[in-house]
Image (spheres, rainbow, N blue to C red):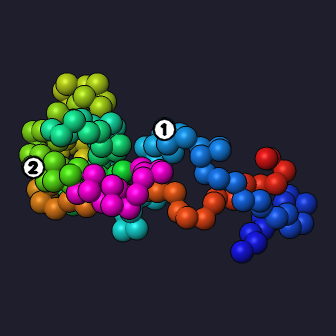
Amino acid sequence: MRVFGIQSDGKFSEYIRTPFQVDHEEAILEEWLESNPDGIVEDGRILIIGRQVVTNFGGFIDLLGVDRHGDVVVVELKRDRTPRDTIAQSLEYVSFAERLDTAQLEGVLRSYLNDESLSLAEHHREYFELGLEEAIAFNKDQRIVIVGQPKFDTFADAKHV
């Protein structure tokens, strides 16, 4: 499939296929997602509370967040892994996240933002602009978002390659 962009002069220019890893390392994508969490899930924003969170299995969750309802969201970036490996590791991470209580989530947030005085409940309430009457129970549910390289290449503007 051919993909085109519109230049500032109104003319079309064709994008050329470029393997994702040529221009983007996983860390760059992780930083971008961390800075732009609003597009990670379809149904709303995520408050990122941790990056490279160490699990009890010795793995590292790329990004850990909570949604408006206080549910935990594990964001994993996968490249060059088989689907079986990706699913196995993802299930391992969600299993770890499922066991995190509010105090542990708050500890992750405090470490992430390097502020030992932070309250997860208050930070969450401010981030999502919730009223005082809106009670939140953290980690009643979990979900995982896997960001991976599809079988097709990404496109790059021919003028910038």
How many numbered marks appear? Answer: 2
Q: Residue 35 carries which label?
A: none
Tell me if residue 88 is in the magenta stretch.
yes
Q: Left or right of 65: which side holds 122?
A: left
Residue 101 showing in the rendered view: yes
The residue nearer to you, when weighing 118 against 37, is: 37
Q: Which x, y percent locates residue 33?
A: 46, 48
Which residue lies at the image location 33% right of the left edge and 55% below the top edge?
Answer: 85
Q: Residues within 10 Å of mark 2 (few under 14, many from 20)?
A: few
Q: Which SS does the magenta portion mostly show?
A: helix
Quarter occupied by residue 107 = top left
The residue nearer to you, when weighing 88 against 14, is: 88
Q: Which amino acid does label 2 sit on?
A: Arg
Distance Cα–Cα, label 2 vs label 1: 27 Å
The residue nearer to you, when weighing 116 against 58, is: 58
| Residue with the mark numbered 1 | 27
Q: Is residue 3 above or below residue 70?
A: below
Q: Left or right of 9: which side holds 114?
A: left
- The residues colored magenta run 77-91
**Secondary structure under the numbered disc 2 in the rendered image:** loop
The residue nearer to you, when weighing 99 against 131, is: 99
Which residue lies at the image location 18% right of the left edge and 40% below the top edge?
Answer: 57
Tell me if residue 44 is in the magenta stretch.
no
Quarter occupied by residue 117 = top left
Q: Which x, y percent locates residue 29?
A: 51, 45
Which residue lies at the image location 38% right of the left edge and 61% below the top edge?
Answer: 83
Q: Left or right of 35: which side holds 151?
A: right
Q: Which x, y percent locates residue 118?
A: 21, 32
| Residue with the mark numbered 2 | 99
Which residue lies at the image location 65% right of the left edge and 53% below the top edge?
Answer: 19
